[in-house]
Image (spheres, rainbow, N blue to C red):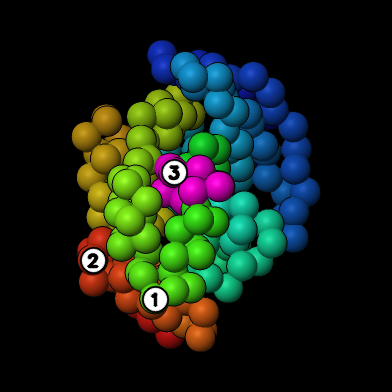
Amino acid sequence: MTTMPPPIGAAVTHCACARMPTAHGDFDMHVYVDGAGTEHAVMVRGTVQGRQDVPVRVHSECLTGDVFGSCRCDCGEQLQAALELIAETGRGVVVYMRGHEGRGIGLANKIRAYALQQGGRDTVQANEDLGLPVDARDYGAAAAIVNALGIRSVALITNNPDKLRALSERGVQVTRRIESSAKVNKHNTCYLRTKRDKLQHELILV
């Protein structure tokens, strides 16, 4: 486990680090702040600096799924699966992106979109009905954090080809994609199918 803070990147500042025991074993939690003042949590296991093909999950903040266990999405399951995979592998990183709630539209708008979905709209249609972008996330800070950690290349844990492309365009060398399966339930069926069919997520629905 690394105990020294990793190098500071040009677009992010490293602020803090401490050992974080979790249900999946010990990680080092680093906190980076981006140029807008947003704090991002980075969970690191093992030695990643100078390494290639490091498993990395860039995870968008999802209060409803990650904290409250909402069955409307697969976010909490993906986060836990990534931590488990990294623990089993012995090294890897989860970059937890604050400010990405609801694909970047914020918590209040996300709940407004949920209300529309209860009326039959899918997740894309709901955002459009509210006059909001379908996906407003920016991955500049995530790429800066990965580069600041000194990782030479990553195996990106994602089902989202846009995320892979965005990180690659920002200087992160992605060697391969590690897919996450999504558990279907009566509350998230439309959501998952919309991500697969309209947003081109490469989902395996189980």
Q: Disc 1 and disc 3: Cα gap in Å?
A: 20 Å
Is there CB contact under 8 Å for labels 1 and 2? Answer: no
Give the SS element for disc 2: loop
Identify which residue is drawn at 50% across, 43% down: 106
Identify which residue is drawn at 62% across, 52% down: 63
Q: Main secondary structure of the magenta part?
A: helix
Q: Nearer the viewer, residue 161 or 113?
A: 113
Residue kind at label 1, given as amino acid type: Gly
Density class for disc 1 (Cα within 10 Å; few <14, some 14-19, many ≥20) is few
Q: Does the magenta portion include 197?
A: no
Say if residue 147 shows up in the picture: no
| Residue wearing tag 3 | 105
- Counting from the top left corner in percent of width and height, residue 186 is at 51, 85
Q: Nearer the viewer, residue 117 or 13?
A: 117
| Residue wearing tag 2 | 198
Residue kind at label 2, given as amino acid type: Lys
Please report the bounds of the magenta region as a residue range.
Answer: 101-109
Q: Nearer the viewer, mark 1 or mark 3?
A: 1
